[in-house]
Image (cartoon, grey):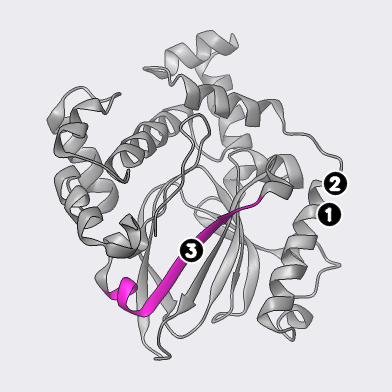
């Protein structure tokens, strides 16, 4: 699977098929951009079984500041969830499917009015957020109907809303990532305490954590590009030195930059 990424737009990378050989053997992962809801959703993603075993496969979820509106057919749950840091051992049933919409950073708070920190490292069932939604009736539908219902629900949720100022701020931070939190505070004319409170509410992460995610996602964008070369490692910005880069990438995905480049080269589906 080749990821088509526009350098000028924030498109976080999720690559469970490169990071876990067992996942790759048993699960097919795909992403599709959603032009009709581009203001709030980054993509529609889907995981489908390649086989039908009842075994459990570990999914690796990378930090991206996003909250997803997702469906887990195996567990029969639908709701909002996000991750503050890499989850290396998120179990899924290899024989069941899951899918969802990856919302832009800040979109969850903008659309629901709830603090984003409630969804980070947690799960908010959709029928808890919206008492008019019935999860039991939802799972009586066929998968194709479920996908359509979820799409229509998200479209209705966006309504006539416009992206919030904090969603726009995230795009600004991505386009020109500050070196430290002090620069963000100066840019916004807020104290560090005010910034942390507002960032937790709108993004579910502190300013320091967001800078770390942006730096890490930028590294992934370069390391997983179609024609990546070993020398491209030197293009990665935001790190003190090479050991800092190696340590951050290794902690975040379980591979060094060189090992990730090798995995990309060896994955035929990824480079085609």
- Gap in angstroms between the C-alphas marked 2 and 3: 27 Å
**Bounds of the magenta span?**
22-34
CB within 8 Å, label 3 to label 1: no
Along the polypeptide, which appears first: circle 2 or circle 3? 3
Closer-to-camera residue (91/131): 91
Q: State the image coordinates of residue 17 (x, y, percent, origin top left).
A: 34, 64
Residue 11 appears in view: yes
Along the polypeptide, which appears first: circle 3 or circle 1? 3
Q: In which quarter of the image is the C terminus?
A: bottom left
In the picture as drawn, the residue positioned furthest to the front comes out as: 272
**Residue 25 within the segment the image draws in magenta:** yes
User: Residue beneath label 1, please?
Assistant: 156
**Residue 203 within the segment the image draws in magenta:** no
CB within 8 Å, label 2 to label 1: yes
Q: In which quarter of the image is residue 99?
A: bottom right
- Residue occupying image coordinates x 45% and y 86%: 95
Q: In which quarter of the image is residue 183?
A: top left
- In the rendering, which numbered label is found on residue 30? 3
- Residue occupying image coordinates x 60% and y 24%: 169
Q: In this view, does 260 lie above or below 96?
A: above
Tag 1's secondary structure?
helix
Closer-to-camera residue (71/121): 71
Q: In which quarter of the image is the N terminus?
A: bottom left
Tag 3's secondary structure?
strand
Q: How crowded is mark 3: few (under 14 residues within 10 Å), some or many (20 or more)?
A: some
Closer-to-camera residue (231/149): 231
- Gap in angstroms between the C-alphas marked 3 and 1: 24 Å
Q: State the image coordinates of residue 234 (x, y, percent, origin top left).
A: 19, 27
Residue 207 in the figure: left or right of residue 257: right
Q: How crowded is mark 2: few (under 14 residues within 10 Å), some or many (20 or more)?
A: few
């Amino acid at each position: 699977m080749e990821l088509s990424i526009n350098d000028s737009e924030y498109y976080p990378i999720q690559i469970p098929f490169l990071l876990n050989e067992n996942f790759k053997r048993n699960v097919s992962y795909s992403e599709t951009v959603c032009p009709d809801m581009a203001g709030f959703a980054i993509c529609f993603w889907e995981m489908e079984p390649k086989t039908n075993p009842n075994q459990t496969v570990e999914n690796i979820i990378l930090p991206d500041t996003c909250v997803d509106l997702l469906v887990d057919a195996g567990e029969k749950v639908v709701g909002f969830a996000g991750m503050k840091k890499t989850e290396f051992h998120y179990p899924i049933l290899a024989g069941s499917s899951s899918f969802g919409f990856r919302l832009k950073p800040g979109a969850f708070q903008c659309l629901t009015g709830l603090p984003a920190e409630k969804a980070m490292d947690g799960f908010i069932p959709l029928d808890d957020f919206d008492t008019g939604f019935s999860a039991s009736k939802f799972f009586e539908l066929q998968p194709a109907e479920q996908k359509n219902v979820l799409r229509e629900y998200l479209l209705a949720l966006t309504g006539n809303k416009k992206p919030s100022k904090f969603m726009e701020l995230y795009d600004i931070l991505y386009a020109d990532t500050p070196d430290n939190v002090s620069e963000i505070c100066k840019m916004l004319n807020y104290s560090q305490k005010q910034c942390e409170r507002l960032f937790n509410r709108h993004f579910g992460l502190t300013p320091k954590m967001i800078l770390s995610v942006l730096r890490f996602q930028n590294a992934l964008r370069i390391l997983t590009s179609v024609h990546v070369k070993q020398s491209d490692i030197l293009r990665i910005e935001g790190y003190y030195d090479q050991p800092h880069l190696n340590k951050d990438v290794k902690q975040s995905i379980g591979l060094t930059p060189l090992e990730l480049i090798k995995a990309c080269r060896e994955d035929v589906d990824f480079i085609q």
